[in-house]
Each structure stands twice: as C-alpha cells, then as structure tokens.
C-alpha cells in the first residue's frame, strides 16, 4: 500500500464530504439555526414589549386608583355635607314645629282664659244679682235681671 495514494484518497474523500456537507447539509442547518435565533429574538422582543405594557398598565392602574380614591373622598365629603344639611334642616323644621306648637298652646291657653273670664264674669254677675236680691229682699223681673247682668258684664271687661 502506498501511503501517498491513501493520503490522496483520504483527502479526496474529505473534500467530497466537505463539498457535500456545504452544498446539501450546511444550508438547511444554517436556515434552521437562523430561524431559531429569529424566534428567540422575537420572543425576547415580545417579552420586552410585555414588560413595557405591564409597566404602562401599572402606571395607569396607579393613576386610576389615585383618581378613584380622590373621587371616593369627594363623595364621602359631599355625603357628610348633605348629612349635615339634612340634620340642620331637620333641626330647623323641629324648631319651627315647636314654635308652632307653642304658639298654638298659647292661643289655646288665651282662649281658655278668656272663656274662664267670661264664665267667671257670668258667675260674678249672678252672685252680685243674687246678693243684691237678698239685700233688697225683693225680686227683680227677668228683663231687668238680664239687663243688669249684661251691664255688669260690660263693666267687668
């Protein structure tokens, strides 16, 4: 066996194998690697976009939360003011009702006093006439009696 011929044959086989690999195996392999690298890059870009969207969403959420808290505080404040207005209105209505009841009671008391005075005047007039009759020991006729009572009532007023 000739060492040179073996060496040349091995080199020829090596170059044929290299050419075959570079022509038929290497392009699909490089294409698959490029596609995988592109998928990985796209995945990383999507992850970056997702992180950016998450940060934006978090900022928007915090803004909305702050606005909601402010709005809730405004609503609570408005409700407290409205409650105070209702209480003040109820106090004013109760005071007005109390004043009206007091005025009605005073008017009724005045009316009762007037009726009592009138009744007392009538009784005083009757007693005066009865006393006068007893003193005089004579009887007064009904017309004269009614006239005396009316006159006495007028004098007592």
Image (cartoon, rainbow, N blue to C red):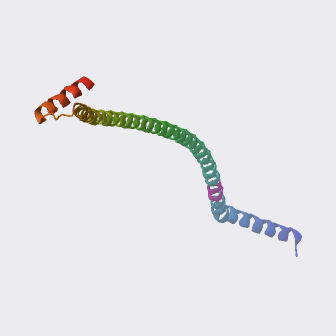
> What is the residue that sits farthest to the bottom in this orientation?
1
Residue at image position (79%, 65%) is 11
On the image, the x and y values in percent for residue 104 come to 33, 36
Q: Farthest top residue? A: 155
**Could you tell me which quadrant the C terminus lies in?**
top left
Residue in front for this viewpoint, 123 or 99: 123
Which of the two residues, 89 or 47, is positioned nearer the viewer here? Answer: 89
Decide if residue 157 is in sight here: no
Query: Could you tell me how many numbered marks the image carries?
Result: 0
Q: Is residue 117 left or right of residue 35?
A: left
Q: Quadrant of residue 137?
A: top left
Q: Which residues are magenta?
A: 35-40
Q: Can you say whether 112 is above or below 39 in the image?
A: above
Type of secondary structure dominating the magenta stretch: helix
Left or right of residue 60, residue 156 in this image: left
Point 66% across, 65% down: residue: 25
Q: Is residue 36 above or below residue 77?
A: below
Q: Between 110 and 148, which is closer to the camera in this rendering?
A: 148
Side (left or right) of 70 relative to 119: right
Return the x and y of residue 52 as percentages of the image width and height: 61, 45
Q: Percent position (x, y) of residue 2?
A: 88, 72
Image-quadrant location for residue 36: bottom right
In which quadrant is the N terminus drawn?
bottom right
Q: Is residue 133 visible?
A: yes
Q: Is residue 133 left or right of residue 97?
A: left
Taking the magenta stretch, the answer to whether it contains residue 39 is yes
Residue 72 versus residue 144: which sits nearer the camera?
Answer: 144
Residue 21 image offset from top left, x and y in percent:
69, 65
Which quadrant holds residue 91?
top left
Q: Any magenta on residue 59?
A: no
């Amino acid at each position: 066996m000739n060492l040179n011929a073996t060496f040349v044959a091995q080199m020829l086989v090596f170059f044929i194998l290299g050419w075959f690999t570079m022509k038929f195996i290497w392009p699909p392999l490089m294409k698959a690697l490029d596609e995988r690298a592109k998928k990985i890059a796209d995945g990383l870009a999507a992850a970056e976009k997702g992180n950016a969207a998450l940060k934006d969403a978090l900022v928007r959420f915090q803004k909305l939360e702050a606005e909601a808290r402010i709005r809730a505080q405004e609503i609570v404040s408005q409700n407290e003011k409205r409650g105070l207005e209702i209480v003040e209105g109820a106090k004013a209505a109760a005071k007005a009702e109390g004043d009206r009841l007091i005025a009605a009671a005073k008017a009724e008391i005045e009316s009762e006093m007037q009726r009592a005075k009138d009744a007392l005047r009538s009784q005083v007039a009757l007693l005066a006439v009865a006393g006068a009759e007893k003193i005089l020991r004579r009887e007064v006729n009904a017309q004269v009696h009614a006239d005396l009572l009316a006159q006495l009532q007028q004098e007592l007023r």
